[in-house]
Image (cartoon, rainbow, N blue to C red):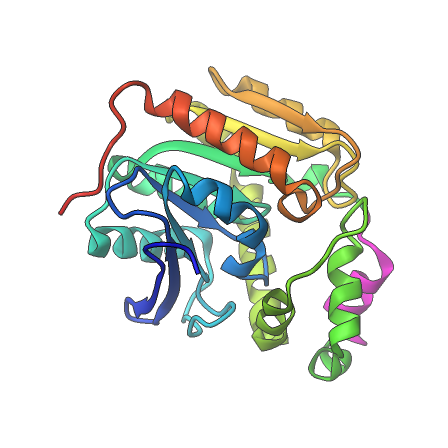
Amino acid sequence: MLPGMSEYDTGPHGMHVVRDGSPPAPPLLLVHGSGTSGASWAPVVPALARHHHVIRIDLPGCGRSRPARSYEVPEQAVQVAALLDGLGLRGVAVAGHSSGGYVAAALAERRPDLVRSLALISTGPGMDALLPQPLILRVLLGPPFGPLLWPRRSDAMIRRGIVATAARPVDIPAEVVSDLRAITYRTFRAVLRANAAYITERGVPERLAALGFPVLVIFGAADPRWDPESAHRYQAVPGARVEMVPGVGHLPMLEAPERIGELLLGFTTAAAGTSPMIPEA
């Protein structure tokens, strides 16, 4: 357990939060992707917590958080903003993995006063960049088999579904498996529909271009979920930095945690400049 670690629920739907590092350090919010949980960030947390007050959340309906009435991306961002307000945080570096990048972008759109910088990892810029999905995911997520198989998933099946989006062998934390088991089929489908609606309405690069935040985009060069070449669309965002990680798929935090930690720390340090924001008392 890292210094300063605590867990608690907050907000109307009980959003689960884990904090690591020293509270006076510059805050860094980590937002997970569809159906997983804050536990998916575990391999990079020790390095990040040496320099940041790291806040990991389980989005509504995921992990240990309670379900929500709506999984629309802007609504999720509203709940995350309420959490940050409750913690008294401003000037937060925000990193989102996959669809967690949509929540991060929506948070910056809705509450720019809370955000200092944005890092997006494996975040598809638009629906036209989506690749044909691995067979196991198509079976688990779509009719007619999805609704029948979902409640009967074994741990081994869940692990196969996760590693299907990786490009190299990965060790899946047991907590990630148990958290993914907890999400219902109905909730997972609602989350996927909400994510698709958000980027269909407007692509992520177009959203970020108008905001003026420092932006880092990290993509696995072998991502089987989103076309890796689509990462370069983010170069339309003024000042955005795009990093391609060779031999890595859709799960960079699990496939190359040391490299991802280095990239995030280098980015947050540069974005903070010489006067990093400190959480309010």
Point 83% across, 64% down: residue: 136
Q: Nearer the viewer, residue 82 or 267?
A: 267
Q: Nearer the viewer, residue 280 or 135?
A: 280
Quadrant in the rendering for residue 149: bottom right
Quadrant in the rendering for residue 123: top right
Q: Nearer the viewer, residue 78 or 260?
A: 260
Quadrant in the rendering for residue 242: top right
Magenta residues (range): 132-145
Point 43% across, 54% down: residue: 56
Residue that protrudes farthest toward the left in the picture: 281
Whether residue 69 sits left or right of residue 43 in the image: it is left
Image position, residue 32 (x, y; %): 53, 53
Work out whether residue 236 can be spotted.
Answer: yes
Image position, residue 73 (x, y; %): 45, 52
Q: Check if residue 253 falls in the magenta segment.
A: no
- Above or below residue 140? Residue 151 is below
Q: Check if residue 138 falls in the magenta segment.
A: yes
Point 72% across, 57% down: residue: 171
Whether residue 101 sits left or right of residue 153 in the image: it is left
Point 28% across, 57% down: residue: 83
- Above or below residue 54? Residue 137 is below
- Above or below residue 230? Residue 42 is below
Image position, residue 240 (x, y; %): 51, 20
